[in-house]
Image (cartoon, rainbow, N blue to C red):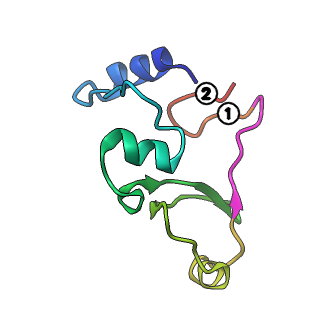
Amino acid sequence: MGIEAVRAFLEALAPDISIIEQASSTATVLDAAATLNVLPGQIAKTPSLRVGDAVVLVVAVCDYRPDNRKVKDALGSRPRMLVPRRGMQPRRGIEFR
């Protein structure tokens, strides 16, 4: 999804939220930490997971590796990464292409 689609989405649904664009890359944890002048542990990752029929968004510190057994126990079943596929219909907001 391009920046213009994000701008249009936020303008329509959350005009009070502004986009902050960085001059250098934030593609990896180390790049983001260097760009923002923080430690890697201060960068958050937000993987989307499918747990049964539910979709869960997890916010975690980037330098943390979760214990898979504890995650499975906490969520009730084994989570799978949510990977958008062509033709999927959005539950809310932005269409997957």
Image location of residue 53, percent across then percent down: 69, 60
- From the viewer's perspective, tell me whether residue 61 is left or right of residue 83: left
Q: What amino acid is found at the position of numbered circle 1 in the picture?
A: Gln
Q: CA distance from mark 2 to mark 1?
A: 6 Å
- From the viewer's perspective, tell me whether residue 79 is left or right of residue 36: right
Residue placed most toward the observer, 45 or 39: 39
Q: Is residue 28 above or below residue 94?
A: below
Residue 95 is marked as 2
Count numbered badges in the picture. 2
Residue 9 is marked as none
Q: Secondary structure at mark 1?
A: loop
- Residue at 52% of width from left, 37% of height from top? 92
Q: What amino acid is found at the position of numbered circle 2 in the picture?
A: Glu
Q: Is residue 25 above or below residue 11?
A: below
Q: Secondary structure at mark 2?
A: loop
Magenta residues, dominant SS class: loop
- Residue at 50% of width from left, 53% of height from top? 46
Residue 89 is marked as 1
Residue range of the region highlighted in magenta in the rendering: 80-87
Q: Are marks 2 and 1 in contact (CB under 8 Å)?
A: yes
Which of the two discs, 2 and 1, labels the residue nearer the N terminus? 1
Residue placed most toward the observer, 91 or 51: 51
Q: Quadrant of the N terminus?
A: top right
Q: Is residue 12 above or below residue 65?
A: above
- Residue at 39% of width from left, 48% of height from top? 33
Image location of residue 95, percent across then percent down: 61, 27
**Residue farthest to the left?**
16
